[in-house]
């Protein structure tokens, strides 16, 4: 079964694609979202194999959203704007369908996606250039968070607190999910409840990490200390 997701701010466009997906055996529609931050919640909670995404949407367009994902699923862009095609294919989109969408054209794109998804594991799927940011939901908006501005992330049950250069963001997200979206070369978990940007660490004192520009010291878990020291070539 191929799990798919629809993102489009136009109700009629979503209903059309929902009907098309329902006609194709082996495809399961997880959600049909009017906003990218609703789609982000689905991606953070469930395994998505294929996204059908509009491009010209409010707040964050479809290309910006896909580019923000560390490990995006396969994508088919469905849009009324053919001038975005080059950008779409630069993100390794499987196809680019211009509205209005006929079922034969939709089926052609879906057959291509089905062949690729069934023939190779997701881990070997082509990936776009790694983004330098991630999107998180804060209130009713989707905030772009630059990796360079993150000092550390603290887990609080089902929420996380992201400590930035000039502010703090609290968002509904599990630590394991945000860790998957962060580049492993730049971030490390130092304790069950703390993920730190490597180059923000100023000193390691006993079982505590001191960070640049921040007064607080973060605890280092026993099971993480050896790996942390190894990252700095100190073990």
Image (spheres, rainbow, N blue to C red):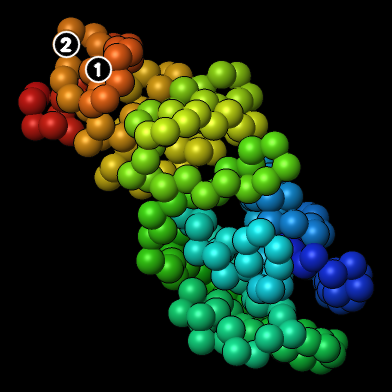
Query: Based on the displayed image, in which of its 4 quarters is residue 110 positioned?
Result: bottom right
Name the residue located 9 percent from the left edge and 32 percent from the top edge.
233
Relative to 67, say whether 31 is above or below.
Answer: above
Q: What number is the disc on residue 42?
A: none
Q: Which is more toward the observer, 121 or 125?
A: 125
Instruction: Report the label total.
Output: 2
Q: Residue 129: give x, y in percent of width and height.
A: 38, 66
Residue 76 shown left or right of residue 154 in the figure: right
Name the residue located 43 percent from the left edge and 29 percent from the top edge.
163
Residue 50 shown left or right of residue 93 in the figure: right
Say what secondary structure mark 2 lies in.
strand
Q: Residues within 10 Å of mark 1 (few under 14, many from 20)?
A: some
Relative to 216, say whether 132 is above or below.
Answer: below
Name the residue located 55 percent from the left edge and 79 percent from the top edge.
88
Say what secondary structure mark 1 lies in.
strand
Give the position of the C terminus as an image quadrant.
top left
> Do residues under tags 1 and 2 come within 8 Å of each other at their CB atoms?
yes
Q: What number is the disc on residue 209?
A: 1
Q: Residue 24: give x, y in percent of width and height.
A: 83, 75
Give the position of the N terminus as an image quadrant.
bottom right
According to the image, label 2 marks what residue?
Answer: 205
Query: Based on the displayed image, in which of its 4 quarters is residue 65 positioned?
Result: bottom right
**Label 1 to label 2: alpha-carbon separation:** 6 Å
Q: Residue 70: give x, y in percent of width and height.
A: 46, 54
Q: Which is more toward the observer, 233 or 68?
A: 68
Residue at the front extreme of this rendering? 166
Name the residue located 54 percent from the left edge and 32 percent from the top edge.
169
Residue 185 in view of the camera: yes
Relative to 172, say whether 57 is above or below.
Answer: below
Q: Residues within 10 Å of mark 2 (few under 14, many from 20)?
A: few
């Amino acid at each position: 079964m191929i799990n798919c997701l629809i993102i489009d701010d136009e109700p009629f466009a979503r209903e059309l694609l929902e009907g098309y997906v329902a006609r194709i055996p082996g495809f399961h529609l997880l959600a049909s979202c009017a906003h990218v931050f609703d789609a982000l919640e689905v991606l953070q909670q469930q395994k998505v194999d294929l996204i059908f995404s509009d491009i010209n949407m409010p707040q964050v367009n479809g290309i910006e959203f896909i580019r923000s994902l560390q490990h995006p699923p396969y994508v088919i862009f469905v849009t009324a704007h053919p001038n975005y095609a080059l950008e779409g294919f630069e993100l390794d989109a499987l196809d680019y369908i211009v509205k209005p969408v006929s079922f034969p054209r939709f089926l052609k794109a879906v057959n291509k996606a089905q062949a690729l998804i069934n023939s190779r594991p997701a881990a070997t799927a082509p990936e776009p250039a790694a983004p330098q940011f991630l999107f998180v939901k804060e209130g009713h908006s989707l905030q772009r968070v630059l990796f360079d501005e993150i000092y550390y992330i603290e887990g609080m049950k089902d929420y996380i607190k992201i400590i930035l250069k000039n502010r703090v963001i609290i968002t509904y997200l599990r630590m394991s999910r945000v860790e998957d979206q962060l580049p492993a070369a730049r971030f490390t978990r130092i304790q069950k409840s703390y993920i730190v940007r490597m180059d923000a660490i100023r000193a390691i004192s006993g079982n505590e990490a001191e960070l640049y520009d921040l007064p607080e010291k973060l605890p280092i878990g026993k099971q993480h200390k050896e790996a942390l020291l190894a990252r700095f070539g100190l073990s």
